[in-house]
Amino acid sequence: MADIETMQDASEIIHYDQADIPLYIQGRVLSKYPDMKALCHWHEDIEIIYIQKGEMRYNINGKSILLQEKDCLIVNSRQLHYGYSNLHHECHFICILFHPGLLSANKKIYNDYVRPFTECETIEYILYTPQISDYDHVASLVNQIYLLKGRPEDGYELEIISTLYRLWKIFFNLYRPVLNKNSAPGYNDIALQKKMVAYIYEHYQNSLTLDEISASANVSRSKCCKIFKKYLQQSPIDFTNEYRLKVSCHLLANTRSSIAQIAISCGFNHLSYFSKIFLHKYGCTPTEYRKQHNTIYRI
């Protein structure tokens, strides 16, 4: 199962391919995620998604984008995002994450070309499809990075970083006219959404109420619900329960804790309710899920 680990502020903990180089390059399949949906999160890293086969939807700050075969998506730093498939269609994709600091060998280059892009609130993402300008160049460079990681030779990291600089030049030139524009509409609401998501991730084990979730961002109950509906297409309570279920999937697959213990540790006070919504969400009982995914537990 593919797990996304987060800090208490909902930022993802990135496990880079090498501890000393802030770079992650992997091929993934969407079916490895519970219910074919990744956890809502954000991070400082730039994220590149290239669809090899199939399709999936990608939500960025409440905007839902359909990614199809050969599409390439670049997600800017600090955006709230996640990938999913409501129709449970399989998707094979390349995921590349790199911290902007990887391009900071020269301070002037970083300040002139990298920081203005990552700190521009009007740039949430770039979508390259085969029909638009620069697509062939971008797709070629992204696949080149993936191939370099797959067939590593001495110094392959230098080639990857060189290729990232070439990609960055394309991104920067595309958005040069808007780099000093004002913030995107609703950006403050995104910050509020991050606060409330972070609060849920930190306190999901408790019996959370709508009042507590809204108070974490100092907004009214109605404002809280509107923000969740706009950016996550869910109510705050539904989002909380979905996160609890994802945590329970991880525990069912990776621990020997009893199902009752897991239910309580995930914030479900009644085992029957936990089992009911688990079955509704995943189409199987917690016991059946454990049998399918847990390699260390034996009934």
Image (spheres, helix red, strand yellow):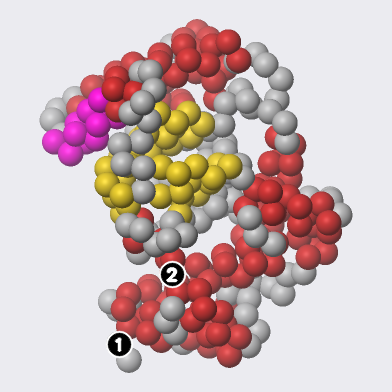
Q: Is residue 142 left or right of residue 212?
A: left
- Where's residue 196, x and y in %? 71, 53
Residue 145 lies in the magenta-colored region: yes
For marks 2 and 1, the one nearer the N-term is 2
| Residue with the most extreme front position | 131
For the residue marked with disc 1, what is the amino acid?
Answer: Arg
- Disc 2 versus disc 1: distance between alpha carbons? 16 Å
Q: Nearer the viewer, residue 4 or 55?
A: 55
- Where's residue 155, x and y in %? 19, 25
- Where's residue 30, x and y in %? 36, 56
- Where's residue 161, x and y in %? 31, 23
- Residue underneath mark 2: 250
Quadrant placement of the N terminus: bottom left
For the residue marked with disc 2, what is the amino acid?
Answer: His
Q: Nearer the viewer, residue 233 or 270?
A: 233
**Considering the numbered disc 2 on the image, is that residue within a helix, a strand or a loop?**
helix
Stretch of the chain drawn in magenta:
140-151
